[in-house]
Every structure is written in C-alpha cells, then in structure tokens.
Amino acid sequence: MTQRKKKVNRGFARVGRLTILLAGLLFGLLIVGMFAAEAQQNLVIVGTGSTVPAPLYTAWAQEYTRHNPKVQIRYLPVGTEEGLKELARKSGDFAAGEMPLSEKQRSDSGMTEIPASLVAIVTIYNLPQVHQELHFSGDVLADIYLGAIKNWNAPQIAKLNPGVSLPDLSIKVIQRPAGKGSNYIFSEFLSKTSSKFRAQIGTSLSPKWPVGEPAERSSDMADKVKAEPGSIGYVEYQYAAKNHIQHALLLNSAGKFVKASSQSLASACQNAEAPGWNNLTVSLINAHGENSYPMTSFTWIYLPAKSPDSVRAASMDNLLDWVYSSGQAVAEQQGYASLPAPLLAEVKKKLATALH
C-alpha cells in the first residue's frame, strides 16, 4: 500500500471514529432530553412529619408509584412539631403526626387532620437474665420516667411481676428529644394514669424529662436499649415487632395486662369510636375494653387549606383515595393496624368536605 493510501485510510478512520463519537453524544443527549421531559411531566408530592409512620409512608410511596407512575411521594421524617410548622408555612403538600390539632391551629391555618392508620407505642427493656415478658402499669412507668423508681427490683415493679426474679440493677432511662409524636402518645398515657406525672410533666410533644438520655430515632432508641443492660425505652409497636425486640404488656383501663397487636389496637379504636365512628380526632389512649391496648393512637395526615394549584390538589385527592382503599392493606403488611371499615366511611365523608 502506498504512503498516500495509508494517509487516506487513516483519515477515513479518524472521520469514522469522530462520526461514531458524535452519534453517541447525540444519542446520549436525546436520552437525557427524554428523561428530562418525563421528569417534567412527573409530579412530586412532599410530606413532612413524625418518624412513627415513616416506614408506612415509604411503603405507600413505593406502592403508589407502581399504581400511578406519574406521581412520586417524598416523605421527610423531621418530627410532628416540625412537620406542622412546615405545613403552616405552606411548605409541602401534607404533614403527619400523632397529635390532634388545636382549635387555634385549625382556625388560623385552615389545616385539618384525618386518621391515616392505627399506631401504638410499646415499652422495651434490656434484662438479659429475665426471660419472662414483664408487666407494667402507667403509674409505675410514670415513676420510672420521673426518677422516683430507680432500681429494677423495686417493690412497685415486683408487685406487677410476681414470680419473676428481678435483678438488683439500676434502671437506665432512655427517652426521645423534643417534637416527637411518640413523646405525645407516651406522655398522654402516663398523664392519664398518673396524677403525679400529669401535674409535673403533662401531655406534650416535648416533655421536660427529669431523668434519662435522649435517642433521636427509633433505631437509636433500640440500639441504646440493646447495648445497655438495665435500660428501658419506648418505640413504635411495628418497629419492635419487625426487629424482634421484646416489649412489655401494659395494664389497661379494664384492669387487664395486654400486649400490643393489630387486634388489641383495633379493639381500642372500636371501643373509643363505636357506635358513632365519627370522632376522627378522639384519643384512643386508655380506651375501655378488656382487649384494648392502652397506648394506642391514630397517626393523622394533616392537610392544608385547599390548594390554589388545581393539578396538585387533584393529585393529592387521588393519592388519598388510594391511601383509604388499597393503602390500608399496605399498612397491615407493614405492621400497622388499618382503620376499621365504619371509620373509613366517615373518613371519606370528611375528605369530600376537606378537599372540595
């Protein structure tokens, strides 16, 4: 082959490579453009709030996107208090938490709350040498969290657990920091069962705990309790169940010791709501009934006043329709308790008013 032909061939090769490179670049830009166009068509619904239902909203987001690929759900677990603040600032489409709104919050901001599912808080503890499930009353838990009961073999605990060999071991209290929905449920239960706790601390998202060290998240609470023999704490029922964390039976208003389960949560709801089923902001704490778990609560979806954005409003409306139909089965699968059918009917009536 002559030198001239070699140069020509090398030139054609360079042109060929350049053509392929440009074609690849153009194809890449086309794909990026397609994804960008698709992203522009997708709508992202944003919620903020309690960590208690965070796994539920994650599951709902995944399942709903399969149902409606053009809508994505983003839930930020920042705490009930912060979630309400964000919604009041018109940041996001909804919030979530375990505290009913005050009349002032409803009137000033136009917000409303709708029950999303049933949740519960359970007492967890670390006593390696005790293999039986412990029993607690609200009075005893209140005295532990007030610092009045300091040792595991205290007579108040022993009286509730006859036949259990309790160790001579100091109690290490773990609590949650300010703004948490789990604090509200726990402190409401202690306030309803202990006049001393009600007077000194009261029901609050941000109790001023006199003893103990804080754990920011449920996983932090569980890790601290697991790591420290003699410790006690409180987490969401579904978190304890999924992670096989031992939790106590609680004395309910009927004088029975009951363990948290889907059935005992549903019993608390039924006994608090029936026969009207229309008090969607009622407290389920210490509901009457032999089978009612006493630290049961609604977790609510907080909705703002009607959005001026008709597209976002319609998308939120469709999401809630799904939450209160197929979404309830997802709640059961995640270890939460779904809303009973009569209550769901009332929820749908309220939604029709709140969203339209």
Image (cartoon, helix red, strand yellow):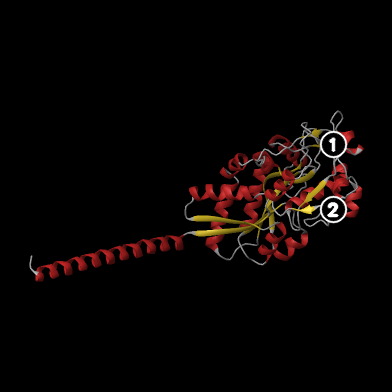
Residue at the (90%, 38%) spot, across then down:
156
**Whole-number angstrom distance, CA of label 1 to CA of label 2:** 21 Å
Residue 208 visible in image: yes
Q: Quadrant of the C terminus?
A: bottom right
Q: Which amino acid lies under the numbered mark 1 shown in the image of this protein?
A: Pro
Residue at the (73%, 40%) spot, across then down:
269
Q: Which amino acid lies under the numbered mark 2 shown in the image of this protein?
A: Val
**Against 1, is 192 above or below?**
above
Q: Name the residue carrying label 2.
A: 211
**Which of the 4 image quarters holds residue 307?**
bottom right
Element type at marker 2? loop
Q: Which mark is residue 167?
A: 1
Element type at marker 1? loop
Residue 1 falls left or right of residue 22: left
* Percent coordinates x, y for residue 306 in the rendering: 62, 62
Q: Quadrant of the N terminus?
A: bottom left
